[in-house]
Amino acid sequence: MGAPAGLPAVMRLYVETYGCQMNVADTELICGLLAGEGFESTTDPSRADVLLVNTCAVRDNAEQRVIGRLSELRRYKRPGIVLGVVGCMAQRLGQQLLDRVSHVDLVIGPDGYRALPELIEGARRGNRATETRFKAWEHYEDVPALRGDGPRAFVTVQRGCDYRCTFCVVPITRGRERSRRLADVVAEVENLVDHGISEVTLLGQTVNSYNDGQHDFADLLSAVGTVEGIRRVRYTSPHPNDFSERVLLAMATVPTVCEHVHLPVQSGSSHILKRMGRRYDRRQYEECVANLRRSIPNLAITTDIIVGFPGETEEDFLATESLVRQIGFDDAFTFKYSQREGTGAVRLPAQVPEATKGERLERIIATVREIACSRNLQLIGSREEVLVEGLARRGELLQSRTRANKVVLISGPAEWIGSYLTVRLTGTTGATFTGVPSAAGKELTIVG
Ligand code: SAH
Ligand code: F3S
């Protein structure tokens, strides 16, 4: 059967993704959904019939980058070629984005991707549209994600967020928290194993508050962690208040759950934490870390930090620096506070000047690096199990990762990708490691 008049035989889809892992997972859903409609993916925007930009709204600079990128993508716009903005920035701006950027055809929020085929059809006939309604039930359960190659996969288990941190736009862009049914998650993970996946990362905005009405996050960790063929389970990001005894027990007793937690702290000052609406103070965060470390020996802990939140004094900032040293974070993502329309913090007095934010960011980055480096130096000489993930970005080396999420570059043949090896850590740049494969205390000679 031929293609309908005026339509190319095969429609080509180009997607660019910004922001967090959940956006990466959403892009995989979008690609899967459109593959089901006969679309082929392309990495070349000049060959695409549909170009989508999956966006982040968490900080203003993320949005500015997208605006800049949309101007560049304009050159691919010809009659019949569709340009769409999807994700959190699309949800936040909706119609405003259509009004502001005249060459954008579609604006679709995180709950609206099922409408893509129909809206793309319409856009090809010149109908520009937005779809930003929240759907409290939406998990794209029947949409098969189209994932890249490699032994690892993201699995979204919870969407939305019911916390209301005063700096954060996510509850505005992703709606209310809801969890997928445990049985559906397990079925997806079983299917991933059949496709060569052995490591999964469970995703949610406060993933450890997962609850499908019958099961909590501890049940989920146990169920996913015991799927045959799964060797590693990770999750991101938990909230400190949602680490129940049951979750700690599951982490400690399910052998596939990795010894790494990404636990956003945001600030080391209780005064600022209160203004942020984080619902814990410094002491409670410290206790949470102590409980985790007691349950899981050799746990690596990474975090997110915001500097320059309204009202942050030099003393508050120094409290954050001291917390970084005290906890001994293995790494941290550090951000300058960015004012987001519609969030509680916009109305707070004592916004911090941009120059002060910039200066504090530099100082916190230096502290995080120093602490991470000193922790990593202590690991030199130790033996670790790594999963070989793929080719390293530069050179001929392979990139692998320990259970504690440390990146180790090793030399070896591409056939090792997807397999587990024991390596001895031989050096570190401070952040990443070099390693040599070893077995039973003896180094291997690498052939080929
Ligand atoms: N709970 C989510 C948080 C999403 S936002 C999760 O899965 O991690 C990711 C990080 O961005 C936050 O932890 C915070 O450190 C940072 N962030 C969020 N809003 C911000 C803002 N307005 N300005 C600067 N950083 C922000
Ligand atoms: Fe944002 Fe706080 Fe939720 S950081 S995603 S409102 S837990």
Image (cartoon, grey):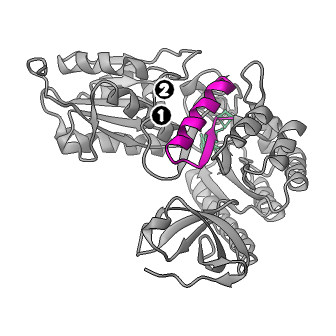
**Disc 1 marks which residue?**
26
Closer to us: mark 2 or mark 1?
Answer: 1
Q: Residue 230, percent across and down?
A: 64, 47
Mark identifier at residue 11: none
Visible in this render: residue 339? Answer: no
**Disc 2 marks which residue?**
110
**Quarter in which the C terminus is drawn:** bottom left
Residue 326 is left or right of residue 344, and the answer is: right
**Residue furthest to the left:** 5
- Identify which residue is drawn at 54% across, 72% down: 409
Query: Residue 393 lies in what quarter of the image?
Result: bottom left
Pick the front one: 220 or 438: 438
Residue 167 is left or right of residue 149, and the answer is: right
Q: Are marks 2 and 1 in contact (CB under 8 Å)?
A: yes
Total tally of numbered discs in the picture? 2
The magenta region covers: 179-206
Query: Residue 46 lies in what quarter of the image?
Result: top left
Choose the circle earlier in sequence order: 2 or 1.
Answer: 1
Visible in this render: residue 68? Answer: yes
Residue 50 is left or right of residue 381, and the answer is: left
As drawn, 207 above or below 360: above
Q: Residue 363, percent across and down?
A: 65, 65
Q: Residue 278, percent across and down?
A: 76, 37
Mark 2 lies within 8 Å of ligand 2 (Cβ measured): no
Residue 434 is left or right of residue 364, and the answer is: left
Amino acid type, callout 2: Pro
- Identify which residue is drawn at 31% across, 20% down: 117
As drawn, 185 above or below 448: above
Label 2 environment density (alpha carbons within 10 Å; few <14, some 14–19, many ≥20)? many
